[in-house]
Image (tube, rainbow, N blue to C red):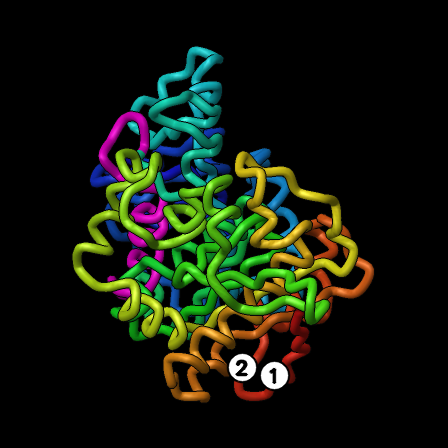
């Protein structure tokens, strides 16, 4: 099976017979056997689309971030998580991975199953595992021997993918190439334990604490995947990637590994449309995407302060507010902070930190 994608440098690998096998006449290509290494490539950007699955749009935005004199040294890849509707034209794409797109309770209680790491409909391969294999292809087989940086970035639903993949994936630890992740305006975040930033009427501010009994009655599964790491939940049957990962290690060890990874959170200052979720009290994350980003970053700081984490690890995570940006992936990624997060020299970065 193959993951469909757009690539700035054509097919990353080739079939044994030397012929390209691609989707949409080579725009979205496949990963097969090795081609001669490209010595010029030093950076790679993997851009993950949002819920609309407009990979071609995200591909163009990603290309716009590459300076003209760096076109030969920067590889841009934009996967497309195909859905059954992509086969409606009668084309033969049975060897491409396809995911459940719409809600289909009880098996798929949430739409965009690739977003939370579900297996494909036609193969026991998670969307997160597909990203693992793509990163592995770029970093471990000498296809690009001079590659120094791989950035995985996504907006909205794509931001959810990037954030949760960075939390669960083992490939980041195994890679000898610098890997950074950029999560822009995700609707929700996966918390590291059951505490949340909860509004306290007495102090007139948020406080990091466990939800009340009354709040739990309205949303008992708030800390199960994909909002948390607690065992069980309605998504576990279709997300064996997450289940296997938590059998291999504890949530506490997973959290420690996560903090050692380079993660950028981008939030639009004007991304403030009120979010409605299936739990009446799911505003535990915040009323809108911008507030949720502030709450999550504050929760990260509180979690690691409570657990005695090395403060240098906290420096791996940065929250950047993009001034005057609504829920718009173009404005987010083309901003100065967005470009710096994706391609900047981490040794010289100045974080624009905001807290709840």
* Magenta stretch, main secondary structure class: helix
Q: Is residue 304 visible?
A: yes
What span is colored magenta in the figure? Answer: 120-142
For this orientation, the residue located farthest to the left is 248
The residue at which mark 2 appears reads as 346
Percent x, y of residue 82: 44, 30
* Badge 2 density bin: few <14, some 14–19, many ≥20, Cα 10 Å: some
- Please identify the quadrant where the C terminus is shown: bottom right
Residue 190 location in percent, x, y? Answer: 45, 55
- Identify which residue, 326 or 279, lies in the foreground: 279
Magenta span has 138? yes
- Residue, x 35% and y 73% (percent of image)? 177
- Picture residue at 23% right of the left edge, 64% below the top: 250
Q: Secondary structure at mark 1?
A: loop
Mark 2 lies on a secondary structure that is helix
Name the side, left or right, on which 46 lies relative to 205. left
Rendered residue at 43%/18% (across/down): 87
* Image vertical order of residue 113 relative to residue 262, above or below: above
Q: Residue at x 29, y 27 (%)?
A: 95
Residue 205 x, y percent position in the rendering = 69, 68
């Amino acid at each position: 099976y193959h993951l469909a994608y757009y690539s700035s440098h054509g097919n990353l690998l080739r079939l044994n017979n030397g012929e390209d096998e691609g989707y949409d006449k080579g725009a979205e290509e496949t990963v097969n056997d090795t081609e001669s290494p490209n010595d010029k490539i030093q950076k790679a950007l993997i851009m993950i689309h949002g819920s609309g699955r407009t990979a071609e749009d995200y591909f163009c935005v990603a290309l716009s971030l590459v300076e003209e004199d760096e076109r030969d040294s920067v590889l841009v890849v934009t996967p497309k998580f195909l859905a059954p509707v992509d086969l409606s034209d009668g084309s033969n794409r049975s060897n491409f991975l396809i995911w459940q797109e719409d809600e289909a309770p009880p098996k798929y209680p949430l739409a965009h199953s690739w977003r939370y790491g579900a297996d494909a409909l036609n193969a026991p391969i998670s969307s997160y595992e597909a990203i693992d294999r793509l990163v592995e292809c770029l970093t471990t087989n000498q296809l690009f021997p001079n590659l120094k940086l791989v950035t995985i970035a996504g907006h909205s639903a794509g931001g959810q993918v990037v954030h949760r993949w960075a939390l669960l994936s083992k490939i980041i630890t195994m890679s000898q190439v610098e890997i950074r992740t950029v999560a822009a305006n995700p609707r929700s975040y996966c918390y590291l334990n059951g505490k949340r930033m909860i509004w306290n009427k007495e102090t007139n501010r948020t406080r990091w604490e466990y939800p009340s009994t009354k709040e739990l009655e309205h949303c008992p599964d708030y800390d199960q995947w994909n909002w948390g790491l607690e065992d069980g939940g309605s998504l576990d049957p279709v997300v064996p990637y997450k289940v296997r990962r938590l059998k291999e290690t504890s949530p506490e060890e997973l959290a420690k590994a996560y903090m050692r990874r380079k993660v950028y959170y981008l939030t639009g200052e004007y991304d403030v449309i009120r979010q409605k979720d299936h739990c009446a009290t799911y505003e535990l994350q915040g009323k809108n995407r911008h507030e949720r980003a502030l709450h999550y970053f504050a929760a990260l700081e509180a979690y690691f302060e409570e657990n005695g984490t090395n403060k240098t690890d906290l420096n791996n995570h940065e929250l950047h507010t993009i001034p005057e940006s609504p829920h718009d992936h173009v404005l987010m990624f083309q901003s100065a902070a967005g470009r710096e997060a994706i391609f900047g020299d981490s040794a010289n970065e100045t974080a624009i930190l905001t807290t709840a």
